[in-house]
Image (cartoon, rainbow, N blue to C red):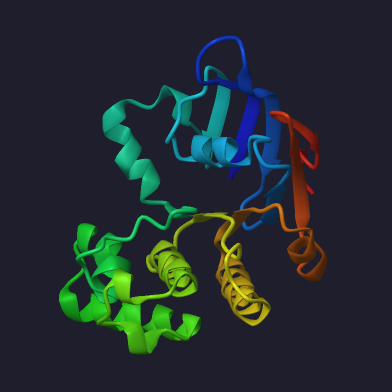
Amino acid sequence: MIRLNNVYMSYGGNVAALHDVSLHIAKGDFVYVTGASGAGKTTLMRLFYLAHAPSRGQILIDGQNITRFKPAQIPYLRRDFGVVFQDFKLLPNRTVLENVGITLEVLGWNKKDIARRVNHVLKQMGLEHKVNSTPQRLSGGEQQRIALARALVNEPKILLADEPTGNLDEATANQVMSVLKEANIRGTTVVVATHDRHLLDKHPRRVIMVDKGRISEGGDEA
């Protein structure tokens, strides 16, 4: 599903954010990307959906070499992804229903089907009662779960979650992990970036370790 071959990434100058990264994540896998702050976790995740282009190397998504994609092809690539950002990127003047359903709106779903699907996903998060709220009326933890609901609403082939439990209490973090596991069972390939060792121990899965821009362990398919 995701394969990187000898990928380098630099933001300029001679300092590489990623150095000679090769890894394989199989279809239907559930993996953690972990490492110290600044190790390159977020940079690596952003390469998967071409938020950044690599300086060198090859990235294959579902067998396609996306490093050769033209700009017009990138939006179609991203339709297969659900992405949870650390800063959530919720639209402040839209309701929870509108924020979560925006992907389905872009895909041409009608309002009735969007509402039905959004309410189903919000119920999984325990947030169906917030459907008409706006982001500024939500706590940070609620915003985080709304961002996850938005990423999952179209049942993406690949889900990328950057610190999805970082601001949550343990009970809510466990609820989020249950939702991620259920999505994985339904066939979504799940990649979670985290530095939380407790999360790795409590919900063990394959771990890809990033250290100073290099893959130090776990890069091969499990």
Which residue is most to the bottom? 129
Q: Is residue 137 above or below residue 108?
A: below
Q: Is residue 155 above or below residue 20?
A: below
Using the rendered view, name the quadrant where residue 204 is placed. Answer: bottom right
Q: Is residue 7 visible?
A: no
- Number of callouts: 0
Q: Which of 156 and 102 is in front in this view?
A: 102
Using the rendered view, name the quadrant where residue 2 is placed. Answer: top right
From the viewer's perspective, tell me whether residue 25 is left or right of residue 121.
right
Q: Nearer the viewer, residue 153 or 42?
A: 42
Q: In this view, does 42 lie above or below 160?
A: above
Q: Can residue 53 be seen in this view?
A: yes
Query: Where residue 134 sits: x, y (%)?
Result: 27, 73
Query: Where residue 21 sits: x, y (%)?
Result: 68, 27
Which residue is most to the top? 14
From the viewer's perspective, tell me whether residue 204 is left or right of residue 56.
right
Query: Where residue 183 sits: x, y (%)?
Result: 55, 69
Q: Which of 76 and 138 is in front in this view?
A: 138
Which residue is found at the position 66% from the left and 48% from the top? 26
Query: Where residue 158 sits: x, y (%)?
Result: 51, 54
From the image, which quarter does the N terminus lie in? top right
Q: Nearer the viewer, residue 108 or 40?
A: 40
Which residue is found at the position 62% from the left and 55% from the top? 192
Using the rendered view, name the quadrant where residue 122 is placed. Answer: bottom left
From the viewer's perspective, tell me whether residue 12 is left or right of residue 180.
left
Which residue is found at the position 54% from the left and 10% from the top? 13
